Image (cartoon, rainbow, N blue to C red):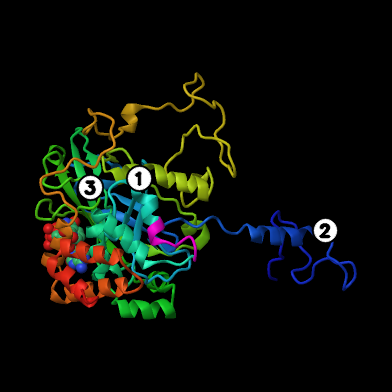
């Protein structure tokens, strides 16, 4: 016998066919509380979609530390041989939930590690850099990439208007317009922590680090033409690819590396090491292997485990701390704030977000709370409640550059800081001739979709600043 249907409190229901009515043709009775529950609940099935990174998919797996990086961090999750369960969520940034996976956009690469010291989240992208370097610009940036107020259309003219008025975007836009701006799927792309973080070892020595997840599947990309075609044929192309790969036992993996900068070198490094529009060239800080990251399990319920997954760069465990990267500082606030709004104040109690280690918090009550601490309800107390212990917490913080005045200012410039240098390096030294050809074609194709004066003239200037030959080529395509 199949299971009898019940309502939400377990009471058997009589029908999913017919509402209670007064006679076959009569009005529906208010006493049909099951009809009301069913439709009222349906009206409440959605939580607000993420304002960025709305479209995504994810999977579970683990991080296994195969090397010894304990000289750089005391974090339990990175000690030799440690294996930690993990959740990842991949996403696109600007499109809404339901938008085609193959639109040109950075991809989110958000990793949650359920460590013995609480959850550690590395909430990055498939690119090592970002469009802006100060979070006060973030809402303006995203508004320019999403929809206009009047006609609800996305508009390349406003995208280029913002980018060219904010030349710090040049490195990320060059990356975006290149081959890696449309990965072939989520498995065949790298992930980056993007920000600089602080590591501290057991002896109290501090280091700056950047995370690199290098795909073991090899890099894959889609041409603009293929991506456009696939967008029409299968909007969920990436979700399907990841799901089916894991279902057939083809478990994708990444090799995790870090770049490590001794703490003192930050002050005089040739680039500002905290500026999110910059990479640390590998020649200066080579990749140091940490371990392997594997995805081996699909979610069993998309909404519960992926849509409600809540990642935060503020989830840092002992041995890991923030850097003065202004974008990171902004995100430390923004992510938990978004979760409280989107899912509710008790989002951390949902199974996918809850740590596997004990929670001894004085947070209590609020909507949808179901595991509530008992007495004592305050700290400090004389009744055996948990107490904060600085030595046990081993908090990793830095006093880097804090003796200063309160001002509004751009970063202090380092010797080689500018907006265009590293973008130019990417074009001239990393890309080959065929890649440069596709880069130019992608830029021209994008700008030909609705970019007009005065923005257009700035587009030529922007690309001439990145690379003169490239800029001239873009201008030529417009007869300039
Ligand atoms: P390297 O020659 O040591 O490294 C070049 C990097 O560029 C590699 O990570 C490579 O990835 C990546 N790459 C190759 N093709 C593309 C592409 N079409 N779009 C984006 N990235 C690509 O150089 P440096 O470290 O000195 O950096 C030079 C430039 O490379 C930087 O200005 C930056 O634009 C780019 N880059 C640098 C990274 C870094 O962390 N240093 C990371 C990613 C890009 P792979 O090894 O998988 O081929």
Mark 3 touches mark 2? (CB < 8 Å)? no
Mark toward the start of the polypeptide (3 vs 2): 2
Q: Nearer the viewer, mark 2 or mark 1?
A: 1
| Residue 314 shows up from this direction | no
Disc ID at residue 136: 1
Q: Which circle, 3 or 1, is nearer the viewer? A: 1
Around disc 2, counting alpha carbons within 10 Å, would you say few (fewer than 14), some (14 to 19), or many (20 or more)? few
Badge 3, how many Cα within 10 Å: few under 14, some, many 20+? many
Question: Cα distance, mark 3 to mark 2?
Answer: 61 Å
Residue to which mark 3 is pinned: 275
Residue at the image position 16 percent from the left and 61 percent from the top: 465
If you read the primary sequence from the N terminus, does the residue marked by circle 3 or circle 1 appear first? 1
Report the Cα–Cα distance between label 2 and label 1: 51 Å
**Distance between mark 3 and mark 1 Cα atoms:** 14 Å
Tell me the tag on residue 30.
2
Bounds of the magenta segment:
143-151
Q: Position of residue 398 (x, y in %)?
A: 24, 33
- Looking at the image, residue 222 lies above or below residue 136: below
């Amino acid at each position: 016998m199949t299971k009898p249907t019940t309502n939400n409190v377990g009471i058997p229901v009589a029908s999913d066919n017919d509402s209670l009515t007064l006679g076959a043709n009569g009005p529906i009775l208010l006493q049909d509380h099951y009809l009301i529950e069913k439709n009222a609940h349906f009206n409440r099935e959605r939580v607000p979609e993420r304002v960025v990174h709305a479209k995504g998919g994810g999977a579970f797996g683990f991080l296994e530390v195969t090397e010894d990086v304990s000289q750089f961090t005391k974090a339990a999750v990175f000690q030799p041989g440690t294996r930690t369960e993990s959740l990842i969520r991949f996403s696109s940034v600007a499109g809404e939930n339901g938008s085609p996976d193959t639109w040109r956009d950075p991809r989110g690469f958000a990793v949650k590690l359920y460590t013995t010291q609480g959850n550690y989240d590395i909430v990055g992208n498939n690119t090592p850099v970002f469009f802006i370097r100060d979070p006060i610009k973030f809402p303006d940036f995203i508004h320019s990439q999403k929809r206009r107020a009047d006609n609800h259309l996305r508009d390349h003219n406003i995208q280029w208007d913002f980018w060219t008025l904010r030349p710090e975007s040049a490195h990320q836009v060059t990356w975006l317009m290149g081959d890696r701006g449309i990965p072939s799927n989520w498995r065949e792309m790298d992930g980056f922590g993007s920000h600089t973080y602080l590591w501290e070892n057991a002896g109290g020595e501090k280091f700056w680090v950047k995370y690199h997840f290098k795909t073991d599947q090899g890099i894959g990309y889609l041409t603009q033409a293929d991506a456009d075609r696939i967008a029409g044929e299968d909007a969920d192309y990436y979700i399907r690819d990841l799901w089916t790969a894991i279902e057939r036992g083809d478990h994708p993996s990444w090799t995790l590396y870090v770049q490590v900068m001794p703490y003192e070198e930050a002050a005089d490094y040739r680039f500002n090491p905290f500026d999110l529009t910059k990479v640390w060239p590998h020649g200066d800080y080579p990749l140091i292997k940490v371990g392997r990251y594997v995805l081996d399990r699909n979610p069993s319920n998309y909404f519960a485990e992926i849509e409600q997954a809540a990642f935060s760069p503020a989830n840092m465990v002992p041995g890991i701390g923030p850097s003065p990267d202004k974008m990171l500082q902004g995100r430390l606030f923004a992510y938990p704030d978004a979760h409280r709004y989107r899912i509710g104040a008790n989002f951390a109690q949902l199974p996918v977000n809850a740590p596997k280690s004990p929670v001894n918090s004085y947070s209590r009550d609020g909507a949808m709370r179901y595991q509530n601490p008992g007495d004592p309800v305050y700290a400090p107390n004389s009744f055996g409640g948990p107490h904060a212990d600085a030595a046990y917490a081993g908090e990793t913080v830095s006093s880097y550059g804090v003796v200063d005045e309160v001002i509004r200012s751009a970063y202090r410039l380092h010797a080689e800081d500018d907006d265009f240098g590293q973008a130019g390096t990417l074009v001239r030294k990393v890309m080959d001739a065929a890649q440069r050809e596709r880069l130019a074609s992608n830029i021209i194709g994008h700008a030909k979709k609705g970019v007009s004066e005065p923005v257009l003239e700035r587009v030529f200037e922007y690309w001439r600043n990145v690379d003169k030959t490239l800029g001239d080529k873009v201008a030529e395509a417009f007869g300039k």
